[in-house]
Amino acid sequence: MVKVITWYGQNPATGQWGYPIRQTWGLTSHQEMSPGLEDKLAFTLTATSSYREAMEVAQKWGCPVDDSTLYVLAQRLGERAEQQTQKRLGTVAQEQLPQRAASELAVFMMDGWQARYRGPGFGKKRTKKKRVEWHEVKMGVFYLQEQAGRTEGGRGVLTEKVVVAWQGESLELGRRLHWEALRRGLGRAQWILVVGDGAPWIWNVAADRWADAVQMLDFYHASEHLWELGRVLFGENQAKEWVEGRLHELRHGQEETFLAQLANLKVPKGRNAKPVREQKNYFANQSHRMNYDEIAKRGWPIGSGAVESACSGHQNRFKRRGQFWTHKGLGNLAALKQARENKHWDELWFTE
């Protein structure tokens, strides 16, 4: 236990009262932790799956702290991280490694996942209002093609990437993702590829930010939609042969034949009419994004595994049992998590 006796007085320059030694140590007026301890605790709570788990890990490395204290810390630092992000977005992004050689391809992948939020009736015994609401969290990933590789076991890995999450409008996600991409070398790429699952908001972001980019429908999602169509048309047991034949055409450069066959499918009557019509429209709308053979031969990705992995990682933190978020609570923790993932961490401790 260390007791510090220090001066308290009025700053003649600002007229504010305070402790000069706290300012020297970088402590705000009501801050109870040193910046060094905040750094360790904040890093711990962004690398674990819950505030309680972070508490247990912190206790293991010698810092007895409760989960409510960690929550308050995450909210305060998360607000700071978001303020710094907004300030950065108002500046011209400076590339981290300007000496980097030109890259053949820059890759953007986008997707979304549903998070549980506290509705207006949350915590109330009797109410007609929703206790729980589900809202989409949009995700974006950026990397350069030379940063993609595979392990000896064949698993795909990225040596470097940008991950951005956003609760609001899709175009704002695009703005944030574009700024981070410029910082990581987007301007040196000869080609840009955007991969998505077919959601309209993804292509809207691409048109807004990277109008000349090559757009690619994720092959896995295309196959999912084809299987759904096959089951409706032929039943669960009879669909396999038809679906696998169409997937072979789609994957191996016969996408025009594939699209022609789908266009010639007759819409059945009855309850199957709607799903068949929906799937036919889905593929018709994505027809210019399915040249898989051509893209694969260039060594470019035809799947969106990187952003699927990012979504899974965030769901492991934000979609656990018993978690019901507020917009502010999720946003602040997500901003803090992204500061760590996108190499803005040290900036949190050097505020103006």
Image (tube, rainbow, N blue to C red):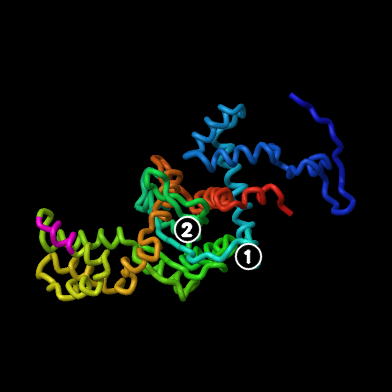
The residue sitting at 47% across, 40% down in the picture is 49
Residue 317, placed above or below residue 327: above
Residue 117 is at least partly visible in this image: no
The image position of residue 128, as x and y in percent, is: 34, 52
Above or below 266: residue 271: above
Residue 93 is labelled as: 1
148 and 85: which one is in front?
148
Distance between the Cα atoms at labels 2 and 1? 17 Å
Which quarter of the image is occupied by the C terminus?
bottom right
The numbered dot on residue 141 is: 2
> Would residue 153 be visible to someone looking at this image?
yes
The amino acid type, in three-letter code, at marker 2 is Val
The type of residue carrying mark 1 is Ala
The N terminus - image quarter:
top right
Tell me the element at label 1. loop
Place of residue 142 in the rendered image (x, y in percent of width and height, measured from the top left): 49, 60
Category of crowding for the residue at label 1, using alpha-carbon neighbours closer than 10 angstroms: few (below 14), some (14–19), many (at least 20): some
Disc ID at residue 163: none
Point out residue 147 in the picture as x, y percentages from the top left corner. 50, 55
Q: Dot 2: what SS?
A: strand
Report the residue that reaches farthest toward the right.
Answer: 12
Asked if residue 128 lies left or right of residue 22, the reply is left
The answer to if 103 sits in the magenta stretch is no
Q: Which residues are magenta?
A: 238-245
Q: Is residue 241 magenta?
A: yes
Q: Main secondary structure of the magenta part?
A: helix
Seen at 28% across and 63% down, the residue is: 222
